[in-house]
Amino acid sequence: MARAATRSNPNAIADAGPQGMNKPAFDVAETLARVSALTIFELRIEWRRLHRAPPPMRLSRDLLIRGISYKLQEKACGGLSKAVARKLESLSADPSLRNKSKPAPPISLKPGVRLVREWRGRTHFVLICPDGVEWSGRRYTSLSAVAREITGARWSGPRFFGLSKAERRFVERAEDRHAEA
């Protein structure tokens, strides 16, 4: 790859046009090595030339190099396919299509439900009350407080007592059966 020596910017990296289908127009490794040797002022000029826009304010030298390197590799090897670009654009435009993990719904157990957990050879029974939970004859404000008492460590109470999504459905069905009886 050759540098285009101009009066305004003697260190500018020359644009490379396509020479062959499989062979890049310039040596990407050599170009990237030269980019890493540029000053921050030269990197900003190179960013403007490649991106056709000024670099974001206060962008570090490292990020300037990464952005320039990506553009150079994109020119040499080709960018994203049109299909991938359309998919990314549609995902960024419509937040409902994003695969965000949603927080688990709060656990709502009816008073009177009994949870059972075996821990280190001992079986623990917890009774759900309207104002908290009861374990070993004492009242607690949450399942997590009971789990902490049992284990001596900070546990998520619902996780400690095995209230995953599938098990929550089982508990709810069991509650419904007991209510019908």
Image (spheres, rainbow, N blue to C red):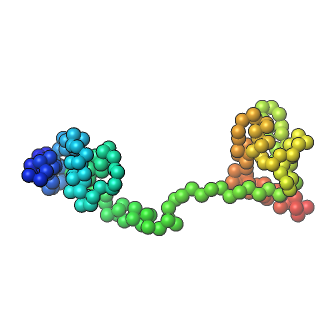
Counting the numbered discs, the total is 0
Find residue 21 and report its image quarter.
Answer: bottom left
The residue that appears at 37% across and 65% down in the rendered structure is 86
In the picture, measured across the screen, residue 36 lies left or right of residue 120, that is left
Q: Is residue 134 above or below residue 90?
A: above
Q: Position of residue 154 (x, y in %)?
A: 70, 39
Q: Position of residue 126 (x, y in %)?
A: 84, 45
The residue that appears at 30% across and 48% down in the rendered structure is 64
Residue 61 in sight in this render: yes
Q: Position of residue 132 (x, y in %)?
A: 83, 51
Residue 73 in sight in this render: no
Find residue 156 and report its image quarter.
Answer: top right
Q: Is residue 120 above or below residue 51?
A: above
The residue that appears at 82% across and 44% down in the rendered structure is 116
- Residue placed most toward the observer, 36 or 123: 36
The residue that appears at 75% across and 44% down in the rendered structure is 144
Which corner quadrant holds the N terminus?
A: top left
Q: Position of residue 41 (x, y in %)?
A: 23, 48
Q: Is residue 123 above or below residue 75?
A: above
